[in-house]
Image (spheres, grey):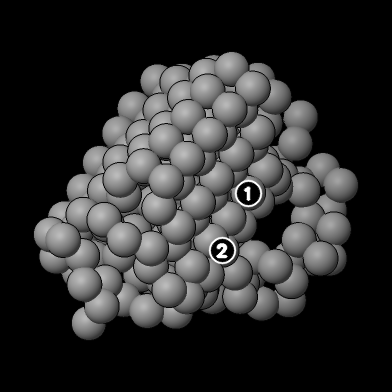
Amino acid sequence: MKKLFIVGAGSFGREIHAWTRQHPDCCQAWLLEGFLDDNPEALKEYGSFATVSPLTGHRPSPDHLYLNGIAQPELKHRLLAPLFAAGAEFLTFVHPTAKIGERVELGRGVVLCPGAIVTADARLGDFVTLNLRSTVGHDAQIGAWTTVSAHCDITGFVQVGEDVFMGSRASIIPGRRVGNGAKIGAGSVVFTHVPPGVTVFGNPARVL
């Protein structure tokens, strides 16, 4: 049985800890070992309910599994990529209440939180995070390292680039493209293509 480490003991990491404990593979295929985080006091105000080990200097082992617990794409990319390059095996995590349609492709290290839905013929790249009750429509594509916050709606034929962040309840209408590194503010509705690296907000979403 492999030991599972959650990378990142912040707010999203704590949520992931709860979701992993609800998974049928917990204590069957893997054992939840704790967190990797360079802040040893990360869980202090929460009763230190799990072990926090340093991420810096950690060396992957064949008997270890890893799970992303970091929401911000830039930080997720910066901290997880070296670990993955060093041979770390990342779990693609699908909560038991998430729904996946036919011919869906999920990359390595993808996290689908409770209530997330991915319909037919969609593709999620490596280390994509799909938070609570967010949906990805048919034929949509989401690039690596992107984080989709809770209650977002990515509709059919949408193309989202790499390292994108979508705030809670943001929506993208069918067929639109979002460039690499863009940020979409909470509650925004994207009606037009979003260039790389910009932040958009509002309904309709406009570049800030």
Q: Position of residue 186 (x, y in %)?
A: 20, 60
Q: Is residue 109 left or right of residue 140?
A: right
Up/down of 141 relative to 112, above or below? below
Q: Nearer the viewer, residue 90 or 174?
A: 174
Q: Return the disc, 1 or 2, that comes first in the chain's sequence.
A: 1
The image quadrant where one finds the C terminus is: bottom left
Residue 125 tag number: 1
Q: Is residue 151 left or right of residue 144?
A: left
The image quadrant where one finds the N terminus is: top right
Residue under pointer 2: 162
Q: Give SS at disc 1.
A: loop
Q: Quadrant of residue 135?
A: top left
Residue 174 can be seen, yes or no: yes
Identify the residue at horizontal 31%, vertical 61% (top origin).
192
Identify the residue at horizontal 58%, vertical 27% (top origin).
121
Identify the residue at horizontal 26%, vertical 72% (top origin).
200
Identify the residue at horizontal 76%, vertical 61% (top origin).
84
Labels 1 & 2 near each other (Cβ < 8 A): yes
Q: Quadrant of residue 63?
A: top right
